[in-house]
Image (cartoon, rainbow, N blue to C red):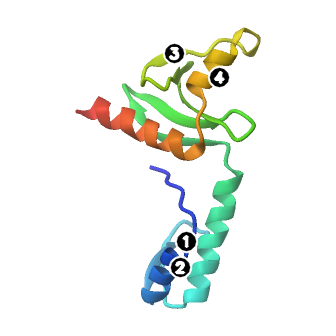
Amino acid sequence: MVQRYKFLPEAEEAIRACWCAMALSSEGEYVMHSDYAALLSHAKHLETRLNMATSFCVGLIREREVNIEARGEGKWCVYRGGYVLTRKGKWEYEPLPSSRTQSFYDNTRFTLEEAFERANAVIKEFRK
């Protein structure tokens, strides 16, 4: 599962307090970091990459991916095989752009944080 974190002062203090931590190397292997500066640099590099992302796969429902996808102007949708999640937690068919109404946009577009919360909630509900 992909999660996105901002570097708050509390988080930086926690990283600093933990003098030895695991981090994923560019080769895809976990390595030990005992240098706070190197760990923070690596974390900021990952944050830069996450900021460039336009889609996140957050799980599966009935063997179909549940994705969070950028839809422009800082808005995101929770997408699953031609359907988008509404604010009421229901899946609605996503029509062609020329057929979408303002009401449709208002009902199916979220901030990134909202999209992650809603996607995780619908996946968790499905697994019950």
Dot 4 and dot 2 residues touching (CB under 8 Å): no
Say which residue appears at 49% left-offset and 43% top-offset.
116
Q: Residues within 10 Å of mark 4 (few under 14, many from 20)?
A: some
Q: In the visual, does 48 lie left or right of 32? A: right
Dot 1 and dot 4 residues touching (CB under 8 Å): no
Of the numbered discs 4 and 2, the one sitting upstream in the chain is 2
Quadrant housing residue 119: top left
Callout 4 amino acid: Tyr
Of the numbered discs 3 and 1, the one sitting upstream in the chain is 1
- Write down the residue under mark 1: 8
Q: CA distance from mark 3 to mark 2?
A: 40 Å
Say which residue appears at 59% left-offset and 79% top-offset.
40
Of the numbered discs 4 and 3, the one sitting upstream in the chain is 3
Residue lying furthest left: 128
Can the viewer see residue 32? Answer: no
Of the numbered discs 1 and 4, the one sitting upstream in the chain is 1
Q: Position of residue 123 (x, y in %)?
A: 37, 35
Can the viewer see residue 46? Answer: yes
Task: Identify the disc placed on residue 12.
Answer: 2
Dot 3 and dot 2 residues touching (CB under 8 Å): no
- Write down the residue under mark 4: 105
Q: CA distance from mark 3 to mark 1?
A: 36 Å
Q: CA distance from mark 4 to mark 2?
A: 37 Å
Q: Position of residue 98 (x, y in %)?
A: 77, 11
